[in-house]
């Protein structure tokens, strides 16, 4: 059983005192009223009732046990680069995985085993510098390995599922499973891990070592430059807002509907790429949500096609 001690007030958030709890036996800190805006790439969103970012598996297990004992809902947060969090924040416990980091490149097998908090683009650059092929497409995709496994992140006709050998999944109950990609329901930008409370703790990828590092770096840089030409990176976003519905691309449909540059509050459909919504500095989560809804309505009206959000929308929202 987990014992808890409250370490008292840490300060004020929105006029309410912030509290913290330390789980005895493993020095894991759980804080109350932690703003999620700085933990997501859109830079919007209210506070988590409770937030923790464990560094080790034993701390993670203790957090889960605490949440179970308090009967709290759990939300999993990687790099926050594909999330729209409500201005009202999130109830229950948010578990940030970004500190669950360990990395092992196995020279003999070409396998890369990493903790779920490792940065995907950082790994891609590192693999390229070592002359390992397999992750060239992943530069420029912000976020963690865990987020990429859950979202089946991809670019330039490659995706996470293509190189995944297995992943370690922790259930809320504390049970750990090692699952191959065939068990994860992978399709374009989705998996059966989305929307649940099963936590990815580690992943192993098959890469190909032994290539000329200069050549792999050159190809990796080419991927990076291609994306910089077509996508806006200068303001906060979540990347593509909608999945491509086929046969047309979401960006094309939105541009043809005349919505480039369309703005609600501080949220704007990007001029450079119509499937990106930018936070121009003062956007609220509600502005972004209203804009998503507006784009869906206008595109459906003109093309009879309902765009499905790729971004994960968390917490309470209402259409105005
Ligand atoms: C500028 C920009 C460019 C982008 N370009 C691309 C692109 O080219 N291709 C692409 O696919 N995506 C792209 N994205 C979207 C995003 O980077 C990817 O979806 C990324 O893989 C999300 O990882 P994350 O760690 O940030 O996940 P988060 O946004 O934190 O979470 C995404 C989902 O995964 C869950 N989750 C996160 N970590 C875990 C875990 N350890 N265990 C269980 N569940 C977890 C969350 O609960 C949530 O449901 C882009 C985003 C930005 C901002
Ligand atoms: N618009 C938005 O909302 C957001 C956009 N982004 C963009 O997404 C992308 C990914 O961001 P982020 O997750 O911060 O990771 P980055 O790709 O910016 O960098 C991660 C690490 O990769 C290594 N690296 C980067 N560029 C090179 C290079 N040319 N050669 C060798 N190594 C390199 C560096 O590692 P080391 O220090 O070990 O050398 C760096 O610290 C970036 O392009 C960023 O601008 C990110 C977040 C939000
Ligand atoms: C950014 C993401 O992933 C990106 C990924 O980086 C790139 C590169 O592989 O390919 C996808 O974009 P995308 O389909 O919009 O690719 P692009 O090459 O930019 O555009 C496709 C087509 O749409 C057209 N297009 C695009 C934007 C626009 O404003 N107008 C327009 O007409 C382009 O002319 C092009 O013919 C992924 N998006 C989705 C939803 O699948 C993400 O998932 O967050």
Image: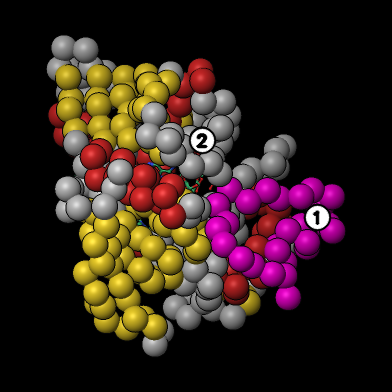
Above or below 21: residue 252: above
Q: Which residue, given by chain and number where applicable, does mark 1 sit on?
A: 300
Above or below 164: residue 93: below
- Secondary structure beneath disc 1? helix
Rendered-image quadrant of the N terminus: top left
Question: Which stretch is magenta?
Answer: 293-320
Q: Where is residue 290 in the image (x, y as percent from the top left)?
A: 66, 70
User: In the figure, is residue 189 to the left or right of 138?
Assistant: right
Q: Where is residue 262 in the image (x, y as percent from the top left)?
A: 64, 72
Specify whether residue 253 is in view.
yes
Q: Position of residue 287 (x, y in %)?
A: 60, 74
- Seen at 82% across and 51% down, the residue is 303
Q: Which residue, given by chain and number where applicable, does mark 2 sit on?
A: 193
- Seen at 18% across and 48% down, the residue is 26
- Seen at 24% across and 25% down, the residue is 112
Specify whether residue 121 is in view.
no
- Graded by Cα atoms within 10 Å as few (under 14), some (14 to 19) or many (20 or more), the crowding at tag 1 reads some
Q: Position of residue 225 (x, y in %)?
A: 35, 47
Label 1 beta carbon less than 8 Å to ligand 3: no
Above or below 224: residue 130: above
User: In the figure, is residue 231 to the left or right of 167?
Assistant: right
- Secondary structure beneath disc 2? loop
Rendered-image quadrant of the C terminus: bottom right
- Seen at 45% across and 31% down, the residue is 159
Label 2 beta carbon less than 8 Å to ligand 1: yes
Give whichever of 311, 96 is nearer the camera. 96
Q: How many labels does the image show?
A: 2
């Amino acid at each position: 059983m987990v014992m808890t001690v409250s370490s008292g007030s840490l300060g004020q958030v929105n006029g309410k005192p912030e509290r913290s709890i330390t789980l005895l036996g493993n020095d894991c800190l759980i804080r109350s009223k932690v703003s999620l805006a700085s933990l997501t790439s859109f830079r919007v969103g209210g506070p988590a009732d409770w937030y923790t970012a464990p560094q080790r598996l034993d701390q993670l297990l203790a957090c889960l046990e605490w949440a179970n004992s308090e009967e709290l809902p759990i939300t999993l947060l990687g790099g926050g680069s594909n999330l729209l969090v409500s201005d009202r924040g999130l109830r229950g416990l948010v578990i940030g995985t970004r500190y669950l980091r360990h990395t092992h490149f196995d020279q003999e097998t070409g396998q890369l085993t990493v903790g779920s908090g490792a940065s995907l683009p950082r790994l891609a650059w590192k693999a390229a510098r070592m002359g390992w092929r397999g992750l060239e497409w992943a530069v420029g995709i912000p976020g963690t390995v865990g987020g990429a496994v859950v979202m089946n992140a991809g670019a330039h006709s490659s995706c996470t599922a293509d190189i995944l050998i297995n992943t370690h999944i922790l259930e809320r109950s504390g049970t750990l499973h090692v699952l191959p990609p065939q068990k994860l329901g992978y399709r374009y930008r989705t998996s059966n891990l989305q929307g649940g409370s099963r936590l990815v703790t580690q992943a192993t990828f098959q890469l190909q070592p032994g290539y000329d590092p200069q050549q792999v770096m050159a190809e990796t840089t080419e991927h990076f430059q291609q994306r910089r030409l077509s996508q806006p990176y200068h303001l906060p976003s979540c990347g593509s807002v909608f999945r491509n519905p086929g046969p047309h691309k979401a960006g094309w449909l939105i541009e043809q509907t005349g919505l480039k540059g369309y703005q609600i509050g501080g949220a704007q459909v990007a001029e450079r790429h119509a499937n990106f919504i930018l936070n121009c500095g003062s956007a609220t989560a509600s502005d972004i949500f209203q804009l998503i809804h507006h784009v869906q309505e206008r595109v459906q009206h003109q093309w009879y096609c309902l765009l499905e959000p790729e971004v994960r929308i968390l917490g309470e929202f209402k259409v105005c």
